[in-house]
Amino acid sequence: MRRVAWFGLLSCMVLVVVVLAVPQVRFLFFGLPEKRLEGSPISEGKTGPAPVAEVSRNEVHQALRDAGLSEQPLLGDISIAGHLARLDEGAVTSAQLMEYADGLRVLALRTGDAGRQIPSAFWDVDTDQLRADGWDAYGVVEALASAEGEPYLAALGAAYTRFHAFKLADLSGADTDDTALDTALDLFEPANDLIDAVPPEHMLETSEFIGGKEQAALYLWQQLVVGSSRRNPLTHIKLFNHGFTTRFHVGTIWQYDTGIAQDNSTIWGVSGFAPVFVGPPENNNQIEHMSISMTVQGILREPLLLLEAFEEIEALVGSSSAGEAAADDALNAAIQQAFLPGFEDDLPSAVDALRGQLRAR
């Protein structure tokens, strides 16, 4: 009887979510101010230096190889073969591909300055979301290789350098104090630096739902960590949406660095969390859960009771166990207690407070 009453209460609460949920919070961070999202590839009608002279197909091939692209696709990237096929079809010119290769080399050098170079194949991808937002791989590389794109590139490079160090230590099997929890929370530093560095007029989009620098840093941090979203459980509308930058996170870069496709849970693991926030071994997505919970509580202001209702519904329908739901509830509550009260006044202190609350003793 108690479960029936609970289910009725939860159904009512979910209905409230349907009515009150804020969909499509978007906030995109780089790009020239005159090149906002217009529904057409940014590489069309571009302004800037005069294009380089047409060169031979072999020269294009060598330039793309020198820029770090693979001969054939590794993980859905266009690859040298794909670009040459476009060249043969007349979809691009040799001059455009030479400029693209130059841009890729700039990105490699700049991210290498942060410590760990982001592989060129990571940028060499045209996704459905990218096309829907009016971009292509050529446009992304052009924007990031510009002066306006440099702060975003620096942030992503610094984030991946920190993450890569964690993964090397984690995979070495050596005794180390570095953990997934510490690494994820450390990525607030490059996120915060980027918000300081990028003037509002150089952002592709802002959002009326993000109020202030700290919320913007939180939203960008979530993108750098996992880039995932949260959907309304009934309408399936995204409550927040990183647009085409959803794949610009350290886990995606790691896949291109290793050549192995993996999901966020496998890539991150749960090291550093106290057992109460993990529960059973199969509950291995706590980094992603933490990032989503912090975003929906800190920006969308979803109440803790509503998050508990979601966990109860998932347990009732069998998509998670009671142990997983309990661990997720504990994590949600810790975020409310340790992070939310002070993050908009003192973000670094709030992050440290959450770290202390969640870490294994």
Image (cartoon, rainbow, N blue to C red):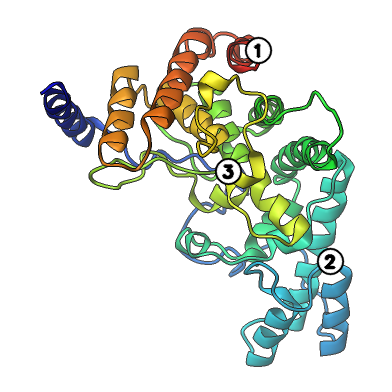
Distance, label 2 to label 3, CA atoms, is: 28 Å
Q: Name the spot of residue 356 as percent of width and height, x first.
A: 64, 11
Mark 1 in CB contact with mark 3 (< 8 angstroms): no
Mark 2 in CB contact with mark 3 (< 8 angstroms): no
What residue appears at the point 55 percent right and 35 percent down from the top-left corner?
A: 281
Q: How many marks?
A: 3
Q: Which residue is mark 2?
A: 68
Q: Earlier in the sequence, mark 2 or mark 3?
A: 2
Q: Name the spot of residue 361 as percent of width and height, x first.
A: 67, 12
Distance, label 1 to label 3, CA atoms, is: 23 Å
Name the residue type under label 3: Ser
Q: Nearer the viewer, residue 221 or 285?
A: 285
Instruction: Indicate left or right for 361 with 23 as reference.
Output: right
Q: Secondary structure at mark 1?
A: helix
Q: Which mark identifies residue 352?
A: 1
Q: Which residue is mark 3?
A: 265
Position of 345 relative to 267 (above/below): above
Name the residue type under label 2: Gly
What residue appears at the point 49 percent right and 42 percent down from the top-left corner?
A: 205
Name the residue type under label 1: Asp
Point out the frontmost of discs 1 and 3.
3
On the question of residue 211 being in view, the answer is: no
